[in-house]
Amino acid sequence: MNPQAKLIFTISLLLGTTITISSNHWIMAWAGLEINTLAILPLISKSHHPRSIEAATKYFLTQSAASALVLFSSMTNAWHTGQWDITQLSHPTSSLILTSAIAMKLGLVPFHFWFPEVLQGSPLSTGLLLSTIMKLPPITLLYMTSSSLNPTLLTTLAVLSAAIGGWMGLNQTQIRKILAFSSISHLGWMAIIIVYNPKLTLLNFYLYTMMTATVFLALNSIKVLKLSTLMTAWTKMPSLNAMLLLTLLSLAGLPPLTGFLPKWLIIQELTKQEMIPAATLMSLLSLLSLYFYLRLAYCTTITLPPHTTNHMKQWRTNKSTNILVAILATMSLTLLPISPLIITIL
């Protein structure tokens, strides 16, 4: 892709995100979401492969439907209350429609079907954008309207997302699809707490973004897309593979790594809200995700699983790792000891 074109699309992405997260009026928020959608489409379809074109089409159709629902919900609210302010979403029907629209934009169950397919058809760099920065504007809208959302609906969506995200990721062999289902289950953890402690949702999102960025950038460095090629990639950059292994365990939420912090705080908050069955269910469902993270981690390390097909070992290169990967990997592994400071900032 032409560097100038890529620069324009990247600036448009940042502009769309900034407009949405800084707006008070529903029309401005909608305009930001539309700019975002239009800017990411060329980045998804830049390889001109039929799968990429299909992914871009699916993404466009789902995001258009979700944007129409956002407009519909804001207009219904304005019709009944006379308010276009995002924080004044007081009409119950409007809040229900908005929750569905945001769930569709984020890829929460039962609106999740587009996300694994789109991620599978996109390059790793675009997949990183889809999993992180494209999720920020919808989560910001949920954050701003959190006081008027329906807790029962969000808890149902969250538990279903954690269940389906973990369950459907078990039998995948494509790494991008595994990361898509991982994203769906993480969104479940964010959705369940948004009504009770919105700041905790944002903390979870920031830490998830950091860990996912580490995984995507590491995979991009070693040019791996399938589990079968991941098994032999340790010869390229052994140290990077070791960091990838630990980052995957951090994404799974194992102590003493960073990923344990949001899960711990969310379970604590749910217990305070006397939602002990929901907290127990979410904890048990995270074991499903843990299984496929362990599978990925197993394939990442030096141990090769028993297999009959011959794999060509790749030459070890002297290519230095990006400094950004090093910083992100360090933060993805070591932030748990400073959790009191993080909680204080919240």
Image: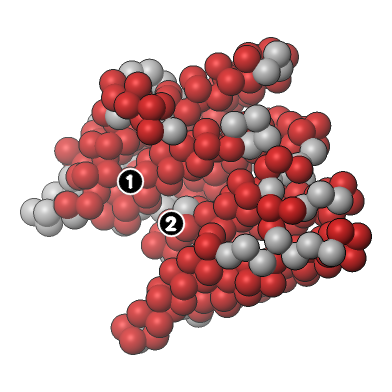
Q: Position of residue 75 (x, y in %)?
A: 83, 67
The quarter of the image holding the N terminus is bottom left
Pick whichever of labels 1 and 2 is earlier in the sequence: 2
Q: Badge 1: how crowded within 10 Å, few (<14), some, or many (20+)?
A: many
Q: Which residue is labeled 1 in the image?
A: 214
Q: Position of residue 189 (x, y in %)?
A: 59, 33
Q: For the residue marked with disc 1, what is the amino acid? A: Thr
The colour scheme is secondary structure
Give above or below for 14 relative to 218. below
Relative to residue 68, is residue 295 drawn left or right?
left
Q: Which residue is labeled 2 in the image?
A: 128
Instruction: Mark 1 and mark 2 in contact? Answer it, CB < 8 Å.
Output: no
Q: Badge 2: how crowded within 10 Å, few (<14), some, or many (20+)?
A: many
The quarter of the image holding the C terminus is top left
Q: For the residue marked with disc 2, what is the amino acid? A: Leu
Could you tell me which residue is drawn at 38 percent across and 33 percent down? 345
Give above or below for 92 relative to 72. above
Could you tell me which residue is drawn at 91 percent across and 60 percent down? 80
Q: What is the residue that sits farthest to the front in this orientation?
A: 82
Q: Secondary structure at mark 1?
A: helix
Res 267 label: none
Q: Secondary structure at mark 2?
A: helix
Q: Position of residue 223 (x, y in %)?
A: 31, 56
Q: Nearer the viewer, residue 229 or 214?
A: 214
Give above or below for 299 relative to 255. below
Q: Position of residue 177 (x, y in %)?
A: 54, 49
How far apart are labels 1 and 2 at the CA level? 10 Å
Relative to residue 245, is residue 20 drawn left or right?
right
